[in-house]
Image (cartoon, rainbow, N blue to C red):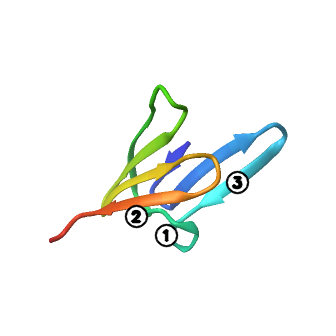
Amino acid sequence: MGTPQGLSMKDGDTWHNYTTDEGLSGNRINAIDEDIAGNIWIATNAGISVFDGSAWKIYKNKY
């Protein structure tokens, strides 16, 4: 679930909250999608974050 303060993801009965402190490119979530490999793509106000289930990869805006 995307919010203006970050991303919340549920794993079983546990919620995990992610912000720039945990690896997001920005805290304002604009869109979320999953690719065929199961990676979660998050578009934020500051770029794109990709979560593979264990680590983040960040693509930041250059402006």
Front residue of 31/52: it is 52
Q: Amino acid at mark 1?
A: Thr
Residue found at the far top of this picture: 36
Callout 3: few (<14), some (14-19), or many (20+) C-alpha neighbours within 10 Å? few
- Marker disc for residue 25: 2
Q: Position of residue 30 (x, y in %)?
A: 36, 46
Quick one: SS at disc 1?
Answer: helix
Circle 3 is placed at which residue position? 16
User: Of marks 2 and 1, which one's residue comes earlier in the chain?
Assistant: 1
Q: Quadrant of residue 26?
A: bottom left
Amino acid at circle 3:
His
Task: Report the residue at 54% width, 65% height from top.
Answer: 19
- Determine contact: label 2, label 1, CB under 8 Å: yes
Q: Is residue 18 left or right of residue 24?
A: right
Amino acid bearing label 2: Ser
Separation of marks 1 and 3 at Cα, in angstroms = 13 Å
Please state if 7 lies on the left or on the right of 42 as rendered.
Answer: right
Judging from the image, what secondary structure is the residue with disc 3 in?
strand
Q: Are marks 1 and 3 in contact (CB under 8 Å)?
A: no
Q: Residue at x 18, y 70 (%)?
A: 62
Closer to the chain start, of discs 3 and 2, is 3
Instruction: Judge whether 7 appears above or below 32 on screen.
Output: below
Report which residue position mark 1 lands on.
20
Q: Position of residue 2 (x, y in %)?
A: 50, 46
Q: CA distance from mark 3 to mark 2?
A: 17 Å
The residue under the point 81% across, 37% down is 12
